[in-house]
Image: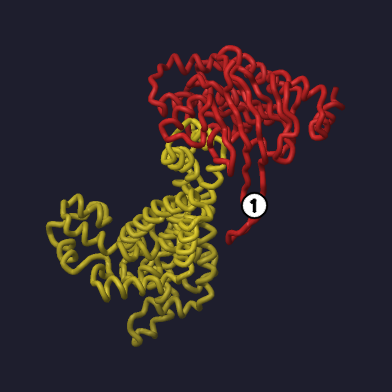
Amino acid sequence: MSELLRAENIAKSYVAGGAFGGGERIAVLKNINFSFNSGESFGLLGPSGCGKSTLARLMLALERPDSGKIFIEGEDIFSLNSKELKAFRRKVQPVFQDPYSSLNPRMTVSDILAEPFIVHGEKYRQSDLKKLLRQVGLGESSLRKYPSEFSGGQRQRIAIARALALKPKLIIADEPLSSLDVSVQAQILNLLADIKEEYGLSLVFISHDLALCKFLCSKAAVMHKGEIAELGEVEDVLLRPKSEAAQTLLQAVLPLN
Amino acid sequence: MLPLVMLGVTFFLFFLTQRLSPEMRASLYIQDPRQMDSLEEVIEKYGLNDPMPVQYFRWLKGAVKGDLGYSESANMPVTSAIKAYLPATVQLAVAAIILVVLFGVWLGIISAKYKDGLADNMIRFFVLAGFSLPIFVLGLILLMIFYGKLGWFAPGEYSFTADMIIHGANFKSYTGFLLIDSLLNLNFYVFFDVLKHLVLPAVTLCIGSFALMVRVMRSSMLEELNKDYVRSARARGLSDFKVIYEHAGLNAMIPVVTLAGIQFIRLLGGTVIVETVFDYPGIGRWGVECAQQLDIAGVMGFSLMVAVLFVLGNLAADILYTAIDPRIRLK
C-alpha cells in the first residue's frame, strides 16, 4: 500500500488580541508528524482546544502552516500552483462538524450536489445526483428542497453526499457526529463506514470520542495542547496508552462502561 | 399595525397643536391685519374652541374620507400638496438608498475580507468621519466645491431651461416623477438635467446612513465567512470571488434588507435639512414651511404621510426577505 498523507514538523500559531497590532502569538500546533497509507483511516483524538480543527484546515490547504509540510500522494500541498491546487481539491474533501452551518441555506440540495461538478468542469446528469442521495440514504424527492427542511442528521448526510460527488481519495471529517444526537450518530457512523468500504477511500476522523474512533480507524493519534502525545495502531493507543494525555482522555469515557 | 400607528401619531400631534390657543390657530386664516376683527368668526367657523376630542374626531372623519384639510402654506388642499411634493422627495430618497446599498454592501464586504487590514481601517475611518459630519455642513461644503468652485452641479430640482420644457405644452406629466416622465416623453435633456441636480443632495443624504450600512454588512459578512459552508466551498475549489460574493455575500445581505427598508423611510422623512440646504422642492421643505407658518393641517398631513410610509417600508422589507432568504419562502 502506498502512502497517502504525510505531515512533517507542522507548526502553526495565531496572533491573539491587540486591536492596534502587536498582539501575542499563540502556538496552536507544534511539531506534528504522522502519516498513513491510502485505504487506511486515521483517527485524530483529543480534548477541545487541542488544535484538531486547525490541523484539519491545514490538511485541506485552507490555511498555511508557519513551518512544516504536508504531502498528499507525495506532493507538497503548500507549494502547488493554482491548477495543481484545483486537482488537489478533487482528492480531498471536508465534512464539517455543524451541519447547520456547512450547507448554504440559499441553495437547494440539487444545487449543492451539482456544484462540485460545475466547479471542476465535469458533466453530470440528474441521475448522478440521485445516485449520490441514494448512497447516503436520502430519497430523490430531496433534490428540490432547501437545507432548512432537513434535520441535523439528514443535513450531515447531504454534506457527506457533497463530499463524495467527485470520488475523493480522502475525506477529512472534523467531528462529524458531535452535533448530532446519539441515535443519529450511530446511523452516520455506519454510513461513514459503508462509504469507506465502497469507495475505498481514506478518512481522517477527528473526534474526542475514543469508541467511535476504534470503530472506524486503524491508526490513531492523541493530541494534547497542540502536540501529538501518542501515535500508533488504534488498539495500542486505546488499550495500552503510554502518555498521560491519552490515559486522561480514556478515563473520561470509562465510567460509562 | 398600520391603523394603530396612524392613530397614535396623529393623536399625539393633535394633542400638541392644541397647546396653541384658538386665537393663534385662527390667525393662520387671516392674511391682513385689518381683518383681525373677524378672529372670533374664524374660531366659530372652524370650531377651534371645541373640546380636543371633538376636534380630533372631526379631523379623523375628514381623513377617512381622504380630506386632510387645506394647507395655507402651499395654497392648496393637503392631499394635493403631498401629491405635488412627494415625487421629488421619493426620487431623491431612491437615489440615496441605491447609493447606500450598493456602496455600503460593497465596502462592507471589502472591509470584512481584509479584516483589520489597511483597507478595513481606512473604510471604517472615513465612514465614521462622514457620519460624524453634520448633514448641513457636508451639504454646504459640497455646494461650495461643486457649485461655487467647479460649477458642475447646481441647487434646485432642475435648471431654468428644463423648467421651461417641463411646463411647456409638449411635456406630458404621467407619474409626477420627473425622471420617469422625461423618459416617457423621450426628453433626455430633462432626464439628465434632473439626474444632475440629484447628485449632490443624494450624496449628502446617504452619508449618514452609510456608516450603519457598512457596519452591519461588515459584521454580518464576518459571521458568514466563519461558517463551514464557506470553508467547504473553498475546499471544493471555488474561486475567491465566487465564495465571497455568491456564497457568503448573498447570505450576509439578509440583515441589510431590513436595514435598507428602515433607512429608506428615514431618508424620506429626513430630507428636511437636505432639501432646505439644496433648495430642493420636496416634501421635507414643505414640512418645514408648514411648521414655520403654523399650518396645522399641513403638519398633520405631513406626519400622517411619514407614518404610513414607515409601515409600508417595513412591509416592503418583509416581502423582500422572502425573496432573499429561502428559509422563509412562502408556499
| Chain represented in yellow | B
What's the chain of the residue with tag 1?
Answer: A
Q: Colour of chain A?
A: red
Seen at 36% across and 79% down, the residue is: B30
Residue beneath the point at 76% across and 22% down: A211
Image coords of residue A37 (percent x, y): 61, 20
Q: Which residue is mark 1?
A: A25
What number of labels is visible? 1
Q: From the viewer's perspective, is residue A191 above or below residue B287?
A: above
Residue type indicated by callout 1: Arg
Which residue extends farthest top?
A: A198
Q: Is residue A43 left or right of residue B280?
A: right
Q: Quadrant of residue A197?
A: top right
Q: Nearer the viewer, residue B282 or A172?
A: A172
State which quarter of the image contains the N terminus of chain A: top right
- Residue occupying the point 49% across, 38% down: B325
Question: Residue at the location (58% across, 59% down)?
Answer: A21
